[in-house]
Image: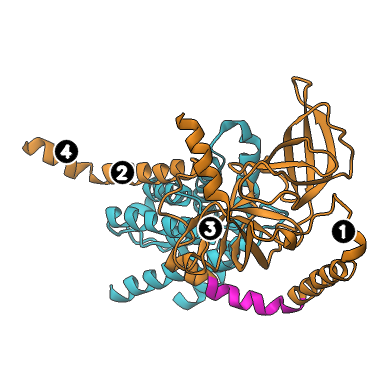
Chain colours: A orange, B cyan
């Protein structure tokens, strides 16, 4: 017994080091598993509070730019509103305010945004108190940003579209051929659309929008345009590079989308599984 | 002694804030960030209790991780360089380290540079390796280590040059 204690005391630094290292690696592995991300995130009261405080300066510096963006969006919405009678028959046009009843929009401000790492997250200044839950979609007027994954009372964390764990259902705007949107971790302006079948008429410059197969985003939210594409190794699916409409390095305010029918659909699907 | 503890607490908090609020947003050329907060580990009193030092280094990295949403990558990198710091000091400064009267501001520039550079490169390599978590991206990891490392070393040498006047 005495010897064991002596051994422990003599090697206490080595043991402490191994313990701390194991703890750090454990936390690292935990964040690499999707949807199991633990209690450590920037959406807690301390870090969220500090980010929100620091972001107040940043917000003030960019007021002009935000105003411009709002003006631009107002202009677009006004154009739609006044021309509504003429364009009502255009089918391929999608505007996010017309999903009445099914989707509910909230606004939030981005207080922390990163885009230079292989797994990026954003922090928003709204949380449970504003009605935000995990699995809600996040967009701007230009396109998709990501999906909420953790929420506390005042803050929420978003898995960015620039995250190697993120998979978003997306499709071609012209036809309904769909695939999964992933990111290879290299360029924050380019994401990859995979698993699009070979039959799809893919052309450079075509628009990619969200697909209707997910319960998170409404169908037809713009994502980006096709930059280039090639067939994958099996020669049966396209691998498409998509240039994002959003500048992911510069995001101020976002909309958080709630799908009001999500619970009902999930319930239905679970019933099917049980039978 | 008390002033030394206070100085280290201020340094700890100050460096974390500078790192997460300013330096992490630089993203020079898309991915190059300096990691100045390692300065805390480099400057921590050389003759202090190694156990406390290890725990402090872990906490330092962990606070950065909390802000960065990066799990435990900074904590792991910091713990490792804190653990091997005595060896690095002996390697860079030789006999004067064993006499326990070493002060970083009075050491020859070459030895100081080698101490800082080796620490930073080891720290950054562990950091980016854990961030990618796969050997498929080894070229990218090495590239990031080298470029961010050079940036960090420059930042640290500059900060030392600016703040060392106070000690004289």
Vertically, is A175 above or below B105? above
Chain of the residue on which disc 4 is drawn: A
Residue count near mark 1 (Cα–Cα under 10 Å), binned few <14, some 14–19, many ≥20: few
Between disc 2 and disc 1, the foreground one is: 1
Q: Is residue B16 magenta?
A: no
Calculate the distance from the C-alpha at mark 3 to the C-alpha at mark 4. Answer: 45 Å
Q: Position of residue A233 (x, y in %)?
A: 75, 21
Furthest residue toward left: A2
Contact (Cβ within 8 Å) of mark 2 with mark 3: no
Element marked by disc 3: strand
Q: Which mark is residue A157?
A: 3
Query: Sequence-wise, which precedes: disc 4 or disc 1?
Result: 4
Residue under label 1: A88
Q: Which mark is residue A19?
A: 2
Chain of the residue on which disc 2 is drawn: A
Q: Which mark is residue A7?
A: 4
Q: Are marks 2 and 1 on the same chain?
A: yes
Residue at (49, 43) in percent of width and height:
A267
Calculate the distance from the C-alpha at mark 1 to the C-alpha at mark 3. Answer: 37 Å
Between disc 2 and disc 3, the foreground one is: 3
Contact (Cβ within 8 Å) of mark 2 with mark 4: no
Vertically, is B167 above or below A95? below
- Looking at the rendering, the stretch of residues picked out in magenta corresponds to A52-64
Q: Position of residue A121 (x, y in %)?
A: 58, 54
């Amino acid at each position: 017994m005495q010897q064991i204690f002596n051994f422990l005391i003599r090697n206490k630094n080595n043991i402490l080091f191994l313990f701390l290292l194991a703890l750090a690696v454990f936390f690292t592995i935990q964040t690499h598993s999707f949807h199991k991300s633990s209690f450590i995130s920037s959406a807690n009261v301390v870090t969220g509070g500090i980010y929100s405080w620091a972001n107040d300066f940043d917000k003030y510096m960019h007021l002009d730019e935000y105003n411009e963006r709002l003006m631009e969006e107002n202009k677009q919405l006004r154009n739609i509103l006044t021309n509504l009678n003429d364009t009502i028959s255009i089918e391929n046009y999608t505007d996010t305010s017309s999903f009445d009843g099914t989707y509910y929009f909230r606004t939030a401000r981005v207080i922390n945004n990163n885009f230079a790492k292989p797994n990026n997250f954003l922090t928003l200044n709204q949380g449970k108190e504003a009605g935000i839950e995990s699995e809600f979609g996040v967009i701007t007027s230009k396109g998709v940003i990501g999906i909420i994954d953790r929420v506390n009372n005042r803050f929420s964390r978003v898995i960015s579209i620039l995250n190697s764990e993120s998979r978003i259902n997306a499709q071609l705007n012209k036809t309904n051929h769909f695939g999964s949107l992933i990111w290879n971790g290299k360029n924050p302006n380019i994401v990859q659309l995979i698993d699009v079948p070979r039959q799809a008429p893919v052309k450079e410059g075509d628009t990619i929008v969200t697909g209707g197969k997910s319960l998170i985003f409404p169908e037809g939210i713009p994502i980006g345009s096709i930059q280039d594409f090639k067939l994958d190794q099996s020669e049966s699916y396209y691998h498409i590079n998509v240039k994002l409409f959003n500048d992911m390095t510069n995001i101020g305010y976002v909309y958080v989308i709630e799908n009001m029918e999500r619970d009902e659909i999930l319930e239905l699907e679970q019933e099917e599984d049980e039978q | 002694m008390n002033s030394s503890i206070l100085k280290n607490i201020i340094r700890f908090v100050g460096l974390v804030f500078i790192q997460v609020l300013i330096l992490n947003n630089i993203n020079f050329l898309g991915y190059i960030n300096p990691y100045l907060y390692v300065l805390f580990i480099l400057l921590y009193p050389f003759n202090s209790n190694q156990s406390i030092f290890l725990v402090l280094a872990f906490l330092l990295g962990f606070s950065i991780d909390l802000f960065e949403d990066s799990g435990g990558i900074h904590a792991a990198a910091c713990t490792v360089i804190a653990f091997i710091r005595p060896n690095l000091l002996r390697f860079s400064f030789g006999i004067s380290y064993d006499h326990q009267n070493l002060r970083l501001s009075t050491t020859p520039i070459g030895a100081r540079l080698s101490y800082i550079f080796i620490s930073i490169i080891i720290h950054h390599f562990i950091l980016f390796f854990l961030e990618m978590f796969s050997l498929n991206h080894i070229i990218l990891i090495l590239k990031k280590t080298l470029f961010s490392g050079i940036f960090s070393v420059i930042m640290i040498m500059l900060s030392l040059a600016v703040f060392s006047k106070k000690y004289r």
